[in-house]
Image (cartoon, rainbow, N blue to C red):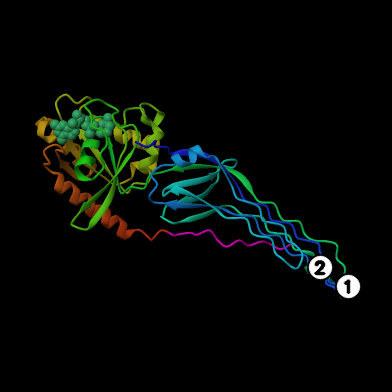
Amino acid sequence: MSLFIDHVRVFVSSGDGGKGCVAFHREKYVPKGGPDGGDGGRGGDVILVADRTLSTLAELRYRKRYEASNGAPGSGNQKTGRDGATLRVRVPAGTVVKDEESGEILADLVRDGQEFLAARGGKGGLGNQHFATPSRQVPRYAQPGLPGESLWLTMELKLLADVGLVGFPNAGKSTLIARISAARPKIADYPFTTLTPNLGVVTWDDYQSFVVADIPGLIEGAHDGKGLGTRFLRHIERTRYLLMMADCTAMADPEPQQALDILRRELLAYDAHLATRPFCVAATKADAADDERLEAVHAWAKQAGAPCFTISAVSGAGITELVRHLGDTVGRMKAQEPEPEVTEAPDPVWDDA
Ligand SMILES: Nc1nc2c(ncn2[C@@H]2O[C@H](COP(=O)(O)OP(=O)(O)OP(=O)(O)O)[C@@H](O)[C@H]2O)c(=O)[nH]1
Ligand SMILES: [Mg+2]
């Protein structure tokens, strides 16, 4: 299994512009050639590109420095130096990029192929061919290239999923995602089996699909760092819809309605926005459940104004109805959202000094 890395810092540095050249045209029998020093090439850019096929920031953890090459100096005969090569760095879709020093969010790369110009290459200097004037016909001057930019970036991955599974450890989250998608997370009858988030694509209604995120179990105090804590709560920040799951077997502790209360409080304490996120409820493990507990969960959901489903990820009971509800709801939510903007790194512009 590959390592799940959702936080890295990297150094990016664009190339310097090459310097302009001082040269004069020389040719046999032409005694006074004019200035013909070429311009320096421009420094290479560092561009971040969102790539849907990456699921973690792991690749960036092993290589911390991304430096594009410098532009080459200009040369005689009006030859422009070669531009430095652009360095493209692939990051998973869902990566939020910040300037480490100021903490400012520079980019939120949500869409596959979306680009962000992280460091702009320096402009090449003009060669002396540009500086001849009637009063100065022998310019011994050319511009130096402009330096590139360099900065430390922090990158944070926030998974993009449609539905987030929220529950205590052992609630049956991983069993459910394994049942409804091709994801195959580890499943076991002890808490904190899932240590990092899993994404699964659920296909329903023949051709429609949505993405589910199974995150590690939450416990009381999670927002404060208890258990696996806030480290993973951020991964449900960007899910449209939550499925709150409560284990309804007789041994489950705390009781399911109490577990649901605690989960709501944890979400609220972590981020008030999460507490207003629409959600539905699943009373899980119906094949082995205690009837009173099932009823208590339905009563809890009714009071909260949330749809409720009794399911068994083991027997399959209730799963079709749940998936249809999730798919329908997510589809409706998506239809109401404006299309997200796609950005591409702009062509470089310089204020000419
Ligand atoms: N009888 C029964 N057992 C279930 C059902 N769903 C899950 N389980 C069992 O409950 C235990 C926990 O399941 P997981 O899917 O690993 O639970 P989880 O919510 O992912 O747990 P964490 O990853 O620790 O947060 C396992 O032993 C599962 O086999 C169900 O529908 N019926
Ligand atoms: Mg799990």
Q: Find out whether residue 204 is within the magenta segment.
A: no
- Determine the residue positioned at 83% across, 69% down: 26
Q: Is residue 174 left or right of residue 13?
A: left
**Residue located 89% across and 73% down the image:** 31
Say whether residue 42 is left or right of residue 62: right
Quadrant where the C terminus sits is bottom right
Element under label 2? Answer: loop
- Does the magenta segment cover residue 349? yes
Q: Tag count in the figure?
A: 2
Q: Which residue is mark 1?
A: 32
Closer to the chain start, of discs 1 and 2, is 1
Which x, y percent locates residue 84? 62, 55
x then y, percent, for residue 119: 59, 51
Residue 231 horizontal side relative to residue 263, left or right: right
By secondary structure, the bulk of the magenta-drawn segment is best described as loop
Q: Amino acid at mark 1?
A: Lys
Label drawn at residue 19: none
In the picture as drawn, the residue positioned furthest to the front comes out as: 28
Q: Is mark 2 within 8 Å of ligand 2?
A: no
Between marks 1 and 2 in the image, the one whose residue lies nearer the viewer: 1
Decide which of 225, 41 is in the foreground and name it. Answer: 41
Q: Specify whether residue 168 is in view.
A: no
Q: Quadrant location of ligand 2?
A: top left
Percent position of residue 294, x then y: 13, 34
Q: Residue 99 appears in which quarter of the rendering?
A: top right
Q: Nearer the viewer, residue 193 or 336?
A: 193
Q: Provide the residue span drawn in magenta.
A: 341-353
| Image position of 29 (left or right of 175) | right
What residue is disc 2 on?
A: 131
Q: Looking at numbered disc 2 in the image, what kind of residue is underneath it?
A: Phe
